[in-house]
Image (cartoon, rainbow, N blue to C red):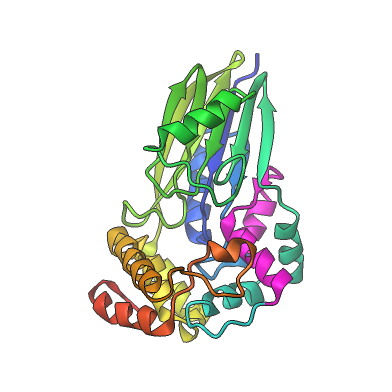
């Protein structure tokens, strides 16, 4: 029986610099196959570079909610004036038409077999790119495990630290966050599965260093800060050890928006844009002043 090493890479969020370091680490560790489980782009403004790397690595690629934002933005022709939304417009306009077409055609879920081991890979859950399978939500996870025909359920999306557990003989694996993990400073998460003799023999949770100062410089050079510094600062908080500040910012923004309107989305929002929390500019900018000590741009 052939021994196969499979790298699971999730939630790059356009961080091509982190991705390059992960692929170097994977090569050094003898990885044979690669799976990308969504949120390839959007947040950091290096979408084209990221997608070129992904496309040249494997065809086992899923879309995440971040790709779905861009797809539905294109379909619905949104033209909201909110400062926050300008980030999504910038990301969409940055992508080449070839790369836009590429993300349009990505599946949200995929079953992949290696030497008799069947993996069901999703971004959020088998049902949706936006559904969160948090580690604490055992009832929801067990629901999917009870329906699972494959040997393992693999996903990302939650930005929790990498974790795995066995439930009823099935592996459940959250592959973490490669591009903007909120628990570290300049470290990328990914997972290597070793498959041997028809079973998963080893699960290696990998942490890889990347040059966070280079990312910072590339953000400045990209021009995205001319559109909205707030969201880019919040994204960078997810890379420089201030992930809690980012979490609290959005928690407060949601509370203030709900107090004002009873909902956090625009009246004309459709599809995933009811999940994309778009806040009024005065809430957005007011909280930016409050959290200014955490911002670097």
Looking at the image, which residue is at 46% across and 28% down? 203
Q: Which residues are magenta?
A: 48-77
- Residue 234 located left or right of residue 2: left
Position of residue 277 relative to residue 188, above or below, is below
In the image, is residue 237 part of the stretch drawn in magenta?
Answer: no
201 vs 247: above or below: above
Residue 62: percent from left, percent from top: 65, 48
Q: Is residue 217 left or right of residue 14?
A: left
Label the magenta part by its dominant secondary structure.
helix
User: Residue 241, can we see it?
Assistant: no
Residue 77 in the image: state x and y as whole percent: 70, 77
The answer to whether any part of residue 215 appears in the image is yes
What's the residue at 64%, 25% (across, down)?
A: 118
Choose top left, top right, bottom left or bottom right for residue 37.
top right
Residue at 28% across, 82% down: 289
Q: Nearer the viewer, residue 131 or 5?
A: 131
* Horizontal relation, residue 287 to residue 115: left or right: left
Q: Is residue 206 above or below residue 280?
A: above
Q: Residue furthest front?
A: 262
**Is 10 in front, or is 131?**
131
* Residue 186 picture quarter: bottom left
Residue at 50% across, 84% down: 227
Q: Quadrant of the C terminus?
A: bottom left
* Vertical order, 179 against 231 (above or below): above
State the count of labels: 0
**How far from the left and from the top, in percent, is residue 219?**
46, 74
């Amino acid at each position: 029986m052939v021994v196969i090493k499979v790298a699971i890479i999730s939630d790059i969020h356009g961080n091509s610099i982190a991705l390059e370091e992960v692929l170097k680490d994977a090569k050094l560790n003898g990885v044979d196959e690669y799976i990308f489980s969504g949120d390839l782009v959007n947040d950091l403004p290096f979408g084209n570079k990221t997608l070129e790397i992904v496309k040249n690595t494997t065809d086992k690629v899923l879309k995440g909610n971040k790709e779905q934002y861009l797809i539905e933005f294109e379909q619905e022709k949104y033209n909201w004036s909110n400062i926050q939304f300008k980030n999504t417009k910038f990301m969409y306009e940055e992508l080449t038409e070839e790369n836009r077409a590429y993300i349009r055609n990505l599946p949200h879920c995929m079953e992949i077999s290696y030497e008799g081991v069947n993996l069901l890979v999703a971004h959020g859950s088998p049902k949706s790119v936006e559904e969160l399978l948090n580690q604490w939500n055992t009832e929801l996870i067990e629901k999917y495990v009870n329906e699972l025909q494959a040997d393992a359920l693999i996903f990302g999306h939650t930005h929790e630290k990498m974790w795995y557990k066995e439930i009823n003989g099935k592996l459940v694996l959250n592959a973490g966050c490669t591009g903007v993990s909120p628990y570290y400073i300049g470290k990328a998460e990914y997972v290597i599965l070793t498959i041997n003799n028809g079973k998963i023999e080893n699960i290696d949770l990998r942490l890889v260093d990347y040059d966070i100062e280079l990312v910072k410089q590339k953000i400045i050079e990209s021009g995205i800060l001319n559109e909205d510094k707030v969201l880019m600062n919040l994204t960078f908080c997810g890379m420089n050890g201030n992930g809690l500040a980012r979490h609290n910012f959005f928690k407060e923004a949601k509370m203030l928006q709900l107090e004002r309107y009873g909902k956090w989305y625009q009246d004309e929002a459709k599809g995933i844009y009811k999940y994309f929390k778009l806040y009024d500019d005065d809430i957005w900018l007011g909280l930016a002043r409050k959290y200014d000590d955490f911002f670097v741009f």
